[in-house]
Amino acid sequence: MRKMLTGSFLLTLFLFMPKDLFPQSGESLDWQIQFLREQNRVSMPINRTIRMETGEGFRLVIGPDNDCYCYVLVYDSEQHIYVWYNQAAKKDSRIQLAPFALTEPSGTETIYVIVSSSRQEELEGLITLFNNSPSRQNTYNLYREIVRLQNAASSLGEPASAIITSGGSFRDADTPSPDDEENFATKFTGKELYVRAIGIRH
């Protein structure tokens, strides 16, 4: 896209692990995520559309508490898809995707963060096809699989979530962040599959 691709991709730990390394245990997993404004590294709530200005930058930090599979894809207002992450992730690792900048044209971008205790083979296969040929049909097929996974995750019920403040305390994720809490993450727990959509309007 012409949006959000002016940044670089960073990993804070070595995360390129063999895809068959992790057992498909079917157990629930916990993970946390931060959405940070790049200018001041202030955390933003992800339970509602994030409003930013064109030209602003941001980063995502994802921390799984279990061995899992993580996929991060973007669907922009021009109906383009970008694959930001497609790897197995180790317990207590730290995945940092940054920095990305919002560029013209203005609109709404959607970041899909998919975290699963088991490998999503259909999704991975469609990502491979898309990476080899980002045709309109492959884009459509990949987006349709994202929506299917989102519907499957939603049918299992909304996952429990809490805000983890810098001091380590917890509170309900739907509660707005007080002005003096600038560094927090949203923690999810209780499911085997999560599909978290983060909307950005600029």
Image (tube, rainbow, N blue to C red):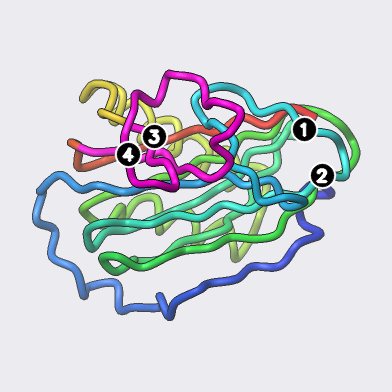
| Residue 18 locus on image (x, y percent) | 30, 78
Tell me the SS state at disc 1. loop
The residue tagged 3 is 163
The residue tagged 1 is 52
* Magenta residues (range): 162-189
Q: Amino acid at mark 4?
A: Ser
Q: From the image, which quarter does the C terminus lie in?
A: top right
Q: Amino acid at mark 3?
A: Ile
Residue at mark 4 to residue at mark 1: CA–CA distance: 28 Å
Residue drawn at the location 55% of the way across and 48% of the way down: 73
Image label count: 4
Tell me the SS state at disc 3. strand
Residue at mark 3 to residue at mark 2: CA–CA distance: 24 Å
**Upstream in the sequence, badge 3 or badge 2?**
2
**Upstream in the sequence, badge 4 or badge 1?**
1
Q: Are marks 3 and 2 in contact (CB under 8 Å)?
A: no
Q: Say whether residue 164 is magenta.
A: yes
Q: Are marks 2 and 4 in contact (CB under 8 Å)?
A: no
Residue at mark 1 to residue at mark 2: CA–CA distance: 7 Å
Residue drawn at the location 48% of the way across and 42% of the way down: 184
Residue drawn at the location 27% of the way across and 28% of the way down: 159
Q: Say whether residue 62 is magenta.
A: no
Tell me the mark number nearer the camera, choosing from 4 and 1: 4
Tell me the mark number nearer the camera, choosing from 2 and 4: 4
| Residue 91 locus on image (x, y percent) | 26, 65
- Up the image or down, 35 lies above or below 11; here it is above
In front of the other: 169 or 123:
169
The residue tagged 4 is 169
**Upstream in the sequence, badge 2 or badge 4?**
2
Tell me the mark number nearer the camera, choosing from 3 and 2: 3
Q: Are marks 1 and 2 in contact (CB under 8 Å)?
A: yes
Tell me: 119 left or right of 164.
left
